[in-house]
Amino acid sequence: MSILSAEHLDLGYRRGLLVVRDLALDVAGGEIVTLVGPNGSGKSTILRALGRLLRPQGGAVYLNGEAIHRLSTRHVARQLAILPQNPTAPEDLTVRDLVVRGRYVRQAWWRASSAHDRGVIDWALASTGLHDLSDRRLNALSGGERQRAWIALALAQEPRILLLDEPTTFLDISHQLDVMALLQRLNAENGLSIVMVLHDLNQAARFSHRLIALHHGAVYASGTPGEVLTEEMMREVFQVEGVVGRDSHTGTPTFTPIQSVRPSP
Ligand code: ADP
Ligand code: MG
């Protein structure tokens, strides 16, 4: 059964001006799904709607079969955590303060934090390699460290579904691989479902069960990385000519770009 789905989704920021039209989407429990598409194709908009941060103008998002906009914030937050593209927090917060906030949505208001809460916070900090930085203020972190702090916040929620918008964008290659390995492990060991937006198509192909390629706010293709990452898709959706190959380590498809084929204005 699908854990998260959308039907006839119309999304936009101003009434009558749709960015995404009549979108259908289905995420199975335990799946890693990655949205790919050029700038402005609607990836963040869709992710925000899936995470209940943006109210659809038409259609609906369903969490375990229930319309998500009818559910309480607390109910949603126990199932789903979202890391938006540019999250903001008071800069004088420490890493631990930020991660502790991930537990608020979990705790009953009358109950102080328990040993379990503290255990989850320590686990979230350790999983993201932040244990030694936990007392550092957010404004004294590098971009990559801050990004990991936000991921730790999402993990502290103990979600069943994690939505991530370009979680590796500010990271160097080794930290990118750490984040992808962490997500892969959480998926394999805890059955965490993941929907994310990635810019790096080769990483998307390597770490996802399924890719969804978006073109002007609509699904152009959805399927295994091999089905979606094709030279034709790259030409039509990304307007780039190149060659599809095979990752010699993982056997997953790769794309080597040659040149842009965007028509001149
Ligand atoms: P992507 O994440 O694929 O780059 P977005 O979902 O951010 O694309 O944007 C899709 C379209 O929606 C773009 O045309 C963008 O200009 C528009 N858009 C995004 N955010 C806003 C906003 N807050 N207000 C108005 N338009 C927006
Ligand atoms: Mg975006």
Image (cartoon, grey):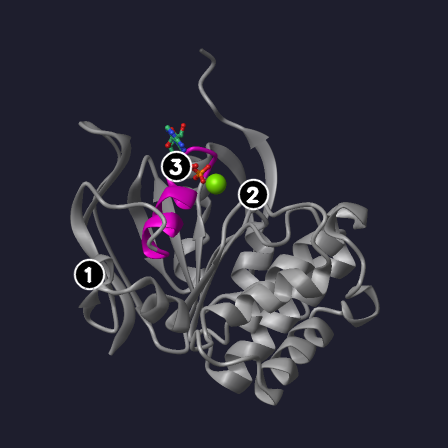
**In the depicted view, which residue is nearer to us: 226 or 23?**
23
Amino acid beneath label 2? Asn
Q: CA distance from mark 1 to mark 3?
A: 27 Å
The residue that mark 2 highlights is 86
Residue 86 x, y percent position in the rendering:
56, 43
Q: Earlier in the sequence, mark 3 or mark 2?
A: 3
In this picture, is 20 found above or below 1?
A: above
Front tag of 2 and 1: 1
**For the point 19% across and 71% down, which residue is it?**
65
Q: Which mark is residue 113?
A: none
Q: Residue furthest right?
A: 132
The residue that mark 3 highlights is 41
In this picture, is 258 found above or below 160?
A: above
The residue that mark 1 highlights is 70
Residue 7 seen in the current view: no
Circles 3 and 2, Cβ within 8 Å, touching? The answer is no
Residue 251 x, y percent position in the rendering:
59, 69
